[in-house]
Amino acid sequence: MLPGMAQDDVQLRPRQSTSSEQVSPDSSATINQSGQPLDARTSDVSSARDSINVDFLKHKNSTIMQQTNTPHPVGSGASGNPVKAVLTKSSQVDAGPSQANGNGAPMDEIQLTKPALKSLVSVNDYISPFRFDATSEATINLQQALNLALDQNLDLAISRTNTKQKEFAYYSSLGNFLPDPTFGYSDYLVKGRIGLPAALSTLFGGSSAAALTSTTASSTTSLAALSTASSASNTIRINHPFEIMHAGLDYYAYRGGSVLFGALQSKHNLKAAKHQESASLSDTLMNITQNYYNLMLAETLLQIRVDAAQVSEEQLRRNQDRFHSGLATNLDVLQSKTQLSRDRQALLDQQVNRRSASIALADSLNINLSGDLIPIEVNVKKVRLIDSRMNVSDILQLALDNRPELKQYEELRLAAKRAIMVAAANLQPTVLISGNAYGIGPPSNVQALGVLAINANWRLRGAGTVDAFDIQQARWQARQASLNSQKELQTVLSQVRNSYLQILDKEKNIEEASNEVESSLEELRLAELRKSSGLGINLDIITAQRDYTQARVDKAQAIINFNIAQAQLLHDTGLISVDALTAGRLLSKSGK
């Protein structure tokens, strides 16, 4: 054992001392509450809470240093060149949807047959062992399921309502560019006295006061006609209806840019909502595809479990006959009964799993859950949706160009930047231009009055501190939006690479599972031959049966997992569609 290594240590490579492990004497040290230098990673004894504080301070300082600079995203690994994706016909035998219109390779295909009810395990006498709680059944294929989801899926409907909300919010923000018409009508019944600071003759002059106190022969009266006071009196008595009507326009010539940048912010939010709706569509298509393939897998595994239970029943019958003939022991019979019970338990579990898979598909389609959905396909086969000759750099570039989530977060980042200008507008004055026409007077003598006004106001809430801190908050929100955009980019790149690796893995699993089926079938044949020849034991046959059943299960799962991985990679590139999933064409790189 090397010196310095504990007994339970594992050395991966020889330890090499580096200059980075030495603490620079002029480096800044963190001071704890006691005033002593603290380095939780080098000192022999340190507080656990102080170690947490050191980590938090490092994080805080790095955030402060980067608040004005956007962190550079890591390399994506994409080709960097525009990639035009097309759906083309392919000569590959495993290309196309999971439909019966293709010729798949025999090793990559499993035939499906509906099991007979008598071969299933019944729960009771009045419930169907196939339908269980379902009251009806209907056949469906992948294309029908996808088209049905486009019309009835609730997630799509919810995302559509969000888009419409953002759309009308944008239209509302555009309305702020228009002037505000104002209309009003007031009718007052005035009765009483008005005290004046001086007599009418003093306020309006002698001739004017006389005119105010005079009346006309007609029903039209002046203000003095409403009064019983003389020109020398400083009190007016009024007992007459009084009307005020007005109509005008208010227009904000300047509001610090809040109208313009508010409209731009709403526009970016609308675009983000549209991209989010596209992302919801992609997720829905992927969810329906996965649920449909899971239902096909459940149907396939049900058939395998039925076959396994029938083989176990036949093996038990043979051992019972051999036991009565003296050619087998009671142990052989008991072992066969145990294996039959295990297979029947697995069969019942799979019956329930198949019905649960049907419910999951019906739930995602938003249809009646009492109907039992049955795949229309008669075989399960390998489906290739993406050309295997496309390299990962081109696939990554397709994701960067087409993933709606990336476009959504970019629009949210731009909307957050516009929000900074909206917050800054509160620190600037507002200029209001208004024009109004008034009609004032009693019903019999309404006179027109025109008013044109320009109002400039500058209000600093909290001596400007409230708006200043709102601006800082908006800046940090914009930074958060930028970081969310970068995080989403990393998530998309990770999803694409993982889906690409899954395809490579699942495709190889199909080959190995097919070999496993062939070898386990031969194992079962030889075990039965050895048993009939007196060279083998019953346990060998049971073991071979288990191996063969599990090999068939592994193969079915490998095929379905490959198909789901193909659809997942199509989803991760942002190019998933009903046509791409069901038209039997490969997504490939255009040669132009």
Image (cartoon, grey):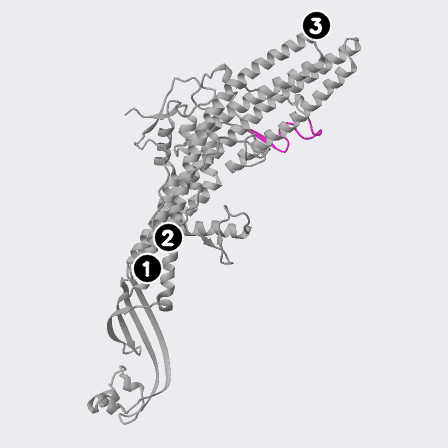
Between 100 and 39, the residue placed more toward the observer is: 39
SS state under label 3: loop
Assess disc 1: are there few (<14), some (14-19) or many (≥20) residues with their C-alpha within 10 Å of its C-alpha.
some
Does the CB distance between marks 1 and 3 fall below 8 Å?
no
SS state under label 2: helix
Q: Residue 249 location in percent, x, y?
A: 27, 65
The magenta stretch spans residue 123: yes
- Residue flagged by tag 3: what amino acid is it? Ser
- Residue flagged by tag 1: what amino acid is it? Ala
SS state under label 1: helix
**Quarter holding the C terminus?**
top left
Does the CB distance between marks 2 and 1 fall below 8 Å?
no
Give the magenta part as a residue range.
122-138
- Residue flagged by tag 2: what amino acid is it? Ala
Q: Which residue is mark 3?
A: 533
Q: Earlier in the sequence, mark 1 or mark 3?
A: 1
Q: Which residue is mark 2?
A: 169
